[in-house]
Amino acid sequence: MKCNYRVFGEVLAFDATYSTNQYNMIFVPFTGVDHHKNCVTIAATLLYDETIESFTWMLEQFLEAHGKQPRLVLTDQDPTMKQAIAKVFNESVHRLCMWHIMDKLPHKIDGDVLQNTNLRRHKWLSDMFSIRDQWVPGYFRDIPMCCLMKTTSRCESSNALSKVNSSASNTLVQFMLCFEIAIDGQRYWQRISEHKTESTSAALSTPLPIEAHAALVYTRSIFKEVQKEISKALLSCMNGRPDVVDGYEHYTVSHFEKGTVIGDYTVKINMSDNSVTCSCMLFTRIGYLCRHVFSAYRFRGINKIPDKYIAPRWKKDALPKKVFNLEFRYGVDSSESFKLRSEALNLAQQCGDRLRGDSVKLAWFVEQIKAIKNKIFEEVPTDPSSNNKGGVFEELVGESQPDSVSFVAPQGIRNKGCGRSRRLIGPGEKAKKKQKRKQSHGDEDNNEENDEDIDEDSDEDSDVEQEEKKELQIVWKTCLP
């Protein structure tokens, strides 16, 4: 997890989930995106409650473990999380999940949004507009990797993975073992992606040398995204000769879709070192070059992506191979005896694999192993751990049993998602129930309410209303993904 955070920790999301163990403790995994665009768990916490103090402690422990703050943090609109993040992650940008806000819109506002003349007095909409810099993507386009995650859906996916392997009746030890299974699943799919990238050749779609170069440096998942940009540069972009200003070539790249120009973009290339900027800012937002830059590079005859525009997090070798070794797993014994035992098992496995196709030598190898085993059992007649009642457990979790226990199981935890009959109801669910009650009153009541609203606004200046509608249309067009 520490290695994943060092490489992929620019942007992360975290969210609270419930019913993970019999004590109703709140489970908070921190989720990032790796170089195969898979979810990776960077850290995880079990909390007693969802207070500012608990979240503050959680983030402080995160910093103690990882040593640096993320560039951008994505959460839902939990006010306690917001205050804790502002206090501890004071160098990070806090961004709210856009999906949660847009999902609440139909439940908060009745009728057609663009035809509703009463929105200027709507409290929820005014509140969302006042904090638009925390959730509208346009306000984050200058932050590197800001589009890596736009919602907490990846975080919720990690929560779901944990729930598949765990249940609400688990003890804490059982929960930790189930959590390890979930993390092993992430490692497995990460290794599958690594193997696919290393053992297969990418299919090229253009004759451009820069595409072949991209296939050599990027993982397979990211190469497909870059390949799409290179193909679009060849088929959907057009630019003329550049204007040279102060050592920079200024290209105007027209982007076509179905024969129609959908936009013009400005690409500037430094003639001395081939450094480049584009007005679409795709490299800043996601970490690889856009079709407009590739179009300008093609005109200029640049056949390789400059090193400065190959983000280390997207490269094939972003993670060292040793990260998949057993000793990097949580709770594994790091003693010298354990390392030697792991090496012995590894050597035996290698020999068995090498002799797999030779039954004669394989039989000889088995006899050698048996001879070694008989000698060892003769010199060490009993298992050293058999004298220790907790030996098997200690070997399983990689920790020795303490002489005394100074803590007890938590009691009486109440949280928003505990599933009890008296559980706390969030604002989103309240809005949905309110909407259902309004619909059940019937068309007659709704018409009366609408008439009252119209009467209240009958004295308003019609020109002002039309102007407000136009402003609202602009706002929502800006906010929509």
Image (cartoon, grey):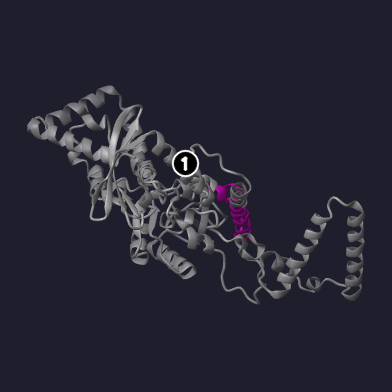
User: Taking 252 as reference, is 432 left or right?
Assistant: right
Q: Residue 83's x, y, as percent?
A: 33, 61
- Three-letter residue code for mark 1: Leu
- 59 vs 444: above or below: below
Q: Is residue 318 visible?
A: yes
Q: Residue 112's x, y, as percent?
A: 26, 29
Q: Nearer the viewer, residue 29 or 254?
A: 254
- 267 vs 143: above or below: above
- Classify mark 1: helix, strand or loop: loop
Q: Residue 6's x, y, as percent?
A: 48, 63
Q: Nearer the viewer, residue 400 or 362?
A: 362
User: Taking 37 as reference, is 346 left or right?
Assistant: right
- Residue bounds of the magenta highlight: 159-187
Residue 265 falls within the magenta-colored stretch: no
Q: Magenta residues: mostly which secondary structure?
A: helix
The residue shown at (57%, 68%) is 408
The residue shown at (65%, 77%) is 403
Picture quadrant where residue 386 is located: bottom right
**In which quadrant of the rendered image does the C terminus lie?**
top left
Q: Residue 20's x, y, as percent?
A: 55, 53
- 379 vs 369: above or below: below
**In which quadrant of the rendered image does the N terminus lie?**
bottom right
The residue shown at (67%, 69%) is 333
Q: What residue would you read off at disc 1?
A: 208
